[in-house]
Image (cartoon, rainbow, N blue to C red):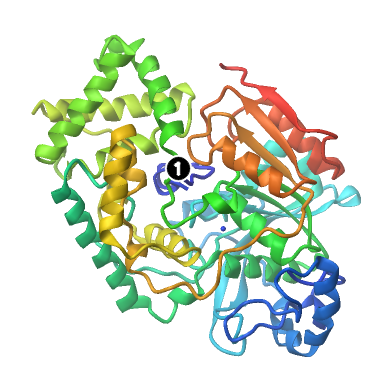
Amino acid sequence: MITSRAVTYRTAAAALVLAGLTACTGAGSEATDAGPEATSSGREDTGAGPEATVAEREAAAGKNAAGAVRLGRFYDQRLAWGKCAQDSDDTTGRDLDKAGVQCANVTVPLDYAAPQGRTITVAISRLQATDTRRRIGSILLNNGGPGVPALQSPPDVRAAMGELGARYDIIGFDPRFVGRSTPLDCGWPIGNSIFSAGNSRASFDRQVELQKSLADKCRTTNASVLPHINTRNTARDMDVIRGALDERKISYLGYSYGTYLGTVYTQMFPGRFDRMVLDGAVAPSSYSPQLLKGLEPENELALDAWATWAAERDVTYSLGRTRGQVLATIDRIMSASGRRPLTVGTAPDVFRIDDTQVPLLLFMGLSDDKDAAREALAEQVSVLAKAADGQPAALSAEFAAVLGIFFTDEDTNLGTVQTALACADGTSSRDIEQYWRDVEASRRTHPLFGPLANNITPCAFWKTPPEKPIQVRDDAAILIVAATGDPRTTYKSSSELHRLLPSSKLLTLNGANRHALYGQYGNACIDRTVNQYLTSGKLPTRNETCENQGA
């Protein structure tokens, strides 16, 4: 499901896929502003029932003021801003320093139900407003994933904002256990848990063994931490960041999974956000431990569009002169990889790619319909086609990096956190045979992406999550941005979130097979409309549609 604002191959590969309190009355210094009293289950308890209105919960929250003060030290903490570069090899930190960005760590409870216990740190960055006379406030960034960092993003967002950027403190953060925050790593032999079931029952059975081993590894290495990795706790961390920044309300820009996080924040902290943009939105009903389920039709359409593009460039890529021939080449790659893994690359970067991995590589290449992204996918498919024919298949540095991140133990933090969040935010079936039945049923209509989207995951072997998924009960006046052909978070999903939040407005880009638009896709209409909202705080009077300039 989820992808992100990818700025490097590491982020692009890792970002796959892609989850009620009192109104704020101060800047984190008052007991009622410090957060809710938490029950032993970790759920916010304002003394009102789950169906209570915001006003009822606000009234009931007074009962918990004495307990809420337990979180006051987190909201009141003074941040030690400094340079971002951690050492001479830290190129990201050096670039942030050059851009005038400062970095700090925010201390938060590991368990909000026991804030007197263990604490962890959340790394944040800040590009301060330079137009202080007209300063609007702070805007917090999330790049999706789940589990993708955003510490590096303030300069990019300021560029997208243009002159408006000078009026915001732009705040990047690495969510708990991501990037420079307190780390989590299960020590997996691979950097990813999302695979296809492959072409046969034998390949599915191997997937069952793999996914169980990944879950077992996490339970063995991090059993005490896993219950506290969930989107609700990330939203709680966001509110601590708001308080530590001394902001009464905070604005927010979230992409992909970050839209689910933003929605959760609106429901848990309904009075504490100002302007909110959710780009490529995930409706709560669409977010599940099987992150890709339901995305098969959109990705087939994106694949067809790419195949048409590649056929027009057969002289360059030799994949086929028609769309049908290009798709037949992919079928040939799948069949060959199911018989035996394809060997690609040359020493030291040699990889063996099988039928559980090929669909994932194709899926990753379909989140963008610009020429640069289509060229990268065509080059990768050309390598796989040569390998399927038994020919030597050299790798570009970029493709080797993608394969290294996903299929080796080069960096397993992102895959670990992404899986832990997905497993903690919803419940999964424990019935292995049900997964196989779903795979076989999906294969009939979606032979390539069905076995990928419906495959078993480590969540089938995960401990039952301690908190229930969020329920949208409070309206929120936010701006939702969506492309009609989004292959990661579907337009239907964005429309559903808009329906759940009647005061929201939906900004549509028509005719684009693209995920993540604002400041990324280069559509002037989208960027202008978002910036107008971020400037005035006023939503468009009605839903608006922009046309894809490159369609």
Residue closer to the observer: 140 or 427: 427
Where residue 500 sits in the image (x, y, percent)? 70, 49
Q: Quadrant of the C terminus?
A: top right
Circle 1 packing at 10 Å, graded few (<14), some (14-19), many (20+), is some
Q: Is residue 111 above or below residue 295?
A: below
Residue 400 location (% of width, % of height): 27, 40
Q: Which residue is mark 1?
A: 294
Residue 451 at what x, y percent from top left? 29, 43
Q: Taking 445 as reference, is 546 left or right?
A: right
Residue 151 visible from this viewpoint: yes
Residue displayed at 67% across by 52% down: 100
In this rendering, is residue 267 above or below 374?
below
| Residue lying at 25% horizontally and 26% vertically, measured from the top left | 330
Residue at image position (25%, 47%) is 197
Rendered position, 88 above or below 53: above
Q: Which residue appears at 76% of the width and 71% of the height?
A: 21
Name the quadrant containing residue 345: top left
Q: Amino acid at mark 1?
A: Gly
Q: Answer with left or right where residue 390 lies relative to residue 226.
A: left
Specify the quadrant of the image occupied by residue 481: top right
Farthest residue, direction right:
133
Q: Left of 162 or right of it: where is 512?
A: left
Q: Is residue 29 visible?
A: no
Q: Secondary structure at mark 1?
A: loop
Q: Nearer the viewer, residue 417 or 509?
A: 509
Relative to residue 148, is residue 24 drawn left or right?
A: right
* Snapshot quadrant of residue 206: bottom left
What x and y, as percent, mark residue 48? 76, 77
Pick the front one: 10 or 2: 2
